[in-house]
């Protein structure tokens, strides 16, 4: 078995895992980690099939990395909006409780005057 054949086998096996194709959880993984994997995989692709194979891998991984980042940004935006909504709800609840307290105080005062 030649070196190139061995790299082809390794490349084929690693490409079965989405992480080695550049798909990853961008919310909880650091980008340096995935770029490190992409660099190693690009070298494996080069040894498996030359610059064309390396370019093909680079296109696949960069597309998947961008998609992973877009998903993470979408989740982050949704989380921020949810946090803002929770804060607005809390403020509204506090305002309602204060109005209710004022109303109860008025009822107590009214009751005092009626008796």
Image (cartoon, rainbow, N blue to C red):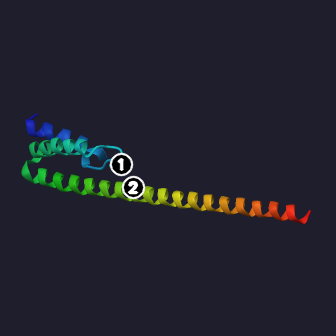
Q: How far apart, in angstroms, are the residues tagged by discs 1 and 2?
A: 8 Å
Q: Which mark is residue 76?
A: 2
Task: Tell me if mark 2 has few (under 14), some (14-19) or many (20+) residues whose alpha carbon lies within 10 angstroms of its own.
Answer: few
Q: Is residue 82 above or below residue 31?
A: below
Decide: marks 1, 2 in contact (CB < 8 A)?
yes
* Left or right side of 29 for 41: left
Quadrant in the picture for residue 90: bottom right
Q: Nearer the viewer, residue 105 or 33?
A: 105
Identity of the residue furthest to the top in this view: 1
Q: Position of residue 43 (x, y in %)?
A: 12, 43
Q: Residue furthest front?
A: 113
Q: Residue furthest right?
A: 115
Q: Nearer the viewer, residue 56 or 70?
A: 70
Residue 98 picture location, percent across and down = 66, 60
Residue position marked by numbered label 1 in the rendering: 27
Query: Residue drawn at (30%, 55%), measured in percent from left and top?
Result: 69
């Amino acid at each position: 078995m030649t070196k190139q054949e061995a790299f082809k086998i390794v490349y084929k096996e690693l490409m079965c895992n989405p992480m080695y194709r550049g798909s990853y959880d961008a919310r909880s993984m650091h980008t340096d980690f995935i770029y490190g994997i992409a660099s190693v995989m690009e070298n494996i692709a080069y040894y498996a099939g030359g610059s064309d194979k390396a370019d093909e891998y680079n296109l696949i991984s960069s597309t998947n990395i961008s998609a992973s980042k877009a998903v993470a940004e979408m989740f982050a935006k949704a989380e921020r909006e949810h946090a803002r909504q929770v804060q607005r709800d809390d403020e509204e609840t506090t305002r309602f409780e204060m109005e209710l307290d004022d109303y109860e105080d008025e009822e107590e005062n009214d009751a005092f005057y009626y008796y």
